[in-house]
Image (cartoon, grey):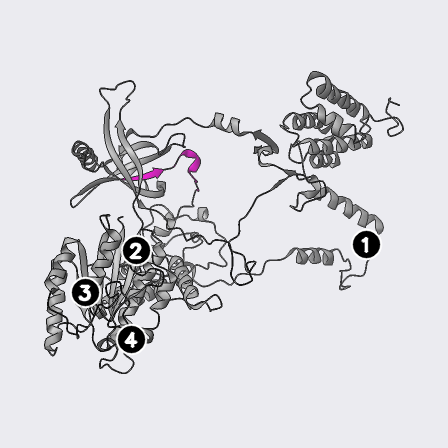
Amino acid sequence: MSKDATVYLLDVSRHMYAHPRAPGETSHLEKALFCIREQVQAKLIQGRKTDVICVILMGTQETHNYLALGDSEQYQHVSILFPDQFNLLAVPSLSLLEAIQKPESLEGQDECDVVDGLIIGLMTIDMFCRNLKYTKQIFLYTCAESAFVVDGSDEVIDRAKEMNVAVNVIGFNFGKPESSEIKRSTEQYLGQCMETTDGELWDGDEALALLQSLHTKNVRPATLFRGPLVLGDPQRYPTETLAIPIFMYNRTVEAKLPTAKKWSKVAPNQETVCMVRASQAYYSVHSDGLDGNLQPGDDRLERHEVIKGYKYGKTIVPFNTVDEEAFKLKTEKSFNIIGFISLDKVHRWMFMGSVASVMAEPGNLSASRSFYAFCRSLYQTQACALVRYVSRDSLAPKIGALIPRIDTGETYCLFVQLPFAEDCRDYSFISLRPLTEPTLGLPESNRVASVLNSSTSFDAHSVGSGVSKGTSVAGPPAKRMKFDARRCSDEEVRHRMDDFVDSMDLMNPPPSGSDGEAFKSQDVFNPVYQRLWQCIIARALNGPASEIPPVDARFMAGIKPLPELEERAKDASLKLSEAFNVKKVESKKSNTTKDVWMARARNANLPLLDGREGSVAPSESSVSSEKRRLAELTVAKVEKIGSITPAADFRAMCARRDKDCIPAAMEQMPQVILQLITNSADGEYYDKALEAIHEFRRGCIIESESDCFNAFLERLQTETLVKTRLHHRFWSGHVVPGGIGAITSDECPDCGAH
């Protein structure tokens, strides 16, 4: 996408706003300003820094241009409307958009000279662009009712052609038989200017209708991949390997909504808002701070003190940055063909993400010939190439398919990413085949199915083999499928469904019914995207306190059926609905937990919380037994102690009553504690290990397992102070100050220590 330099020339003379018109009809000036506003808003939405514009008014009361400085009497009543720049083009801004909002503030004098405006517009482009590569255009809005100076006018056209400036004319009431001689002369000159510079001529009302339609943001195409398409193994068979230089571009990609910057409500000067910057902090969280709120013991950590950990069950497996680089796949940028498969083997549900276009390297004749032969072979054999794609070095490889496309004058391939086994999500749907089988010869009362009362599952549906439609069935009536609500024969149902589909055909939409297609992707706009920009523009122009405008009806029209299409399909839709006995089923209110417990209380003849129903109060023994049962239900069924919450897991295992997990807990807890200490690169898990030791000691006292804890404490001292001194800080800085010692006989009568 090239850089654009655009000048808008607007005739603001009296002929543009005081012309005869019907009551309520907008003037030429209002229509022209609307068109310019739409073009400026489109450029503001695109936000390209290489898109520069300028608005020049012709026929103003005052004169404000760089060619009329001093005592010069030429180029009068021409003004450059741009607050930020006086003599050059600039990026579109909100101030310019606000300046062209009110037509009455721009109304000028009786006449204007379009040639003067063209000269100033060409000079403005020439002074800004110089020898730089720009797409240069002038849009001239006028009714051509004013005379112009003929001398030198042809040189202006020649200069525009020399500068490669396309002059586009948007005329109001052009080509009318009753036009004056001056108007016909001006129209003839502008037509010559337009044809010579390869511009376009638009009627004012036609341009207005075109700009009122929705538009998309033009995105500059950027290559996703530049390199060779390799067929073969260049390392093992370098002479037999085929490498075709290719370029790959995005064909379809999801348009993201613009991100909103975060600003403060009021800046320090109490007048304007200011931009804010978010910062991130890390804290060590203790068990009592798992809810996210900081606790007194939570310590702030620096960024380099934080490492990543992956969950493996309930265990956290840590990896530092060096480990992450080590387990990454070492890949190189490539686009290699793995093999070829038939097109019918690539199903639509396999397509992942965006679609890209692959073509031969531009300007490379040898690559174009090779790639054309490659695409032609795939197209003729109805096959596609399976490729391995790595966009940059060290990135994850992707697998995809190259599907050939041979259009008029174009030969290229579409690249679609295919899923790996881990990406597939299989779901087995129950077969609907019984719904397509002929209806048995059952009475009307049996043939009308009730969706609400039928409890027959899909698998329970059966049709007797060898029974033809329209014959009677001996014995009990055959079971019908739960959703089989047909009221007429299978043949009639299919016929009515075909009629309904044909009536909703989008290839020949009403009312014209001419050849064409409705709801093409390029004609259907995202309502969320369009609505967001509608609100942004309205708030920018009307101020922060303005109300949000109502939703434009055009936004929703693209995702709703055409009214004419609904009218055409009305009869077919009615006949299709009459073919089935389908009724709306009111959803039943589901019983809440409160309702369930109230029902149980009534059945047990117990008094409710509000004193209703029941005369027998529960005894203390029954209440205590209910509490015990409730406690057993709420205890988590923990089988193994993990490294995330070891203290809570140990406590849950010791509290289980359905299974004796105490021996397993006593065996696992020491191992988990030592693992936390060992995996602490800089003491980040010390607090969690210390908490686990406290819980382990308390549990050993309750369960009379003092020997188990004392043996662990001796082992811990040996591991941290004797075998390795990497974690001696844990013993000296946590265990000793924490007063953790061996369990004595005073604490546990069965203990042998004193």
Q: Which mark is residue 618?
A: 1
**Residue 377 pos. (x, y %):** 19, 33
In the rendered structure, which disc, 4 or 2, sits on the residue that comes first in sequence? 2
Q: Which residue is mark 2?
A: 52
In the rendered structure, which disc, 2 or 3, sits on the residue that comes first in sequence? 2
> Are there few (<14), some (14-19), or many (20+) residues within 10 Å of tag 1?
few
Q: Look at 24% across and 23% down and name the residue there.
A: 241
Left or right: residue 108 compared with residue 717: left
Asked if the magenta segment contains residue 383, the reply would be: no
Which is closer to the viewer, label 1 or label 2? 2
Q: Is residue 235 above or below residue 317?
A: above
The residue lying toward the viewer, choosing from 508 and 176, is: 176
- Judged from the image, the secondary structure of the residue bearing numbered disc 1 is loop
Of the 4 image quadrants, the one containing the C terminus is top right
CA gap between label 4 and label 3 equals 20 Å
Disc count in the image?
Answer: 4
CA gap between label 2 and label 3 equals 19 Å
CA gap between label 1 and label 2 equals 85 Å
Q: Which residue is mark 3?
A: 169
Q: Is residue 686 above or below residue 152?
A: above
- Judged from the image, the secondary structure of the residue bearing numbered disc 3 is strand
Q: Which residue is mark 4?
A: 107
**Residue 96 pos. (x, y %):** 35, 64
Task: Verify CB contact (< 8 Å) between mark 1 and mark 2.
Answer: no
Left or right: residue 341 compared with residue 645: left
Q: Look at 72% across and 17% down and name the residue there.
A: 722
> Are there few (<14), some (14-19), or many (20+) residues within 10 Å of tag 3?
many
> Are there few (<14), some (14-19), or many (20+) residues within 10 Å of tag 4?
many
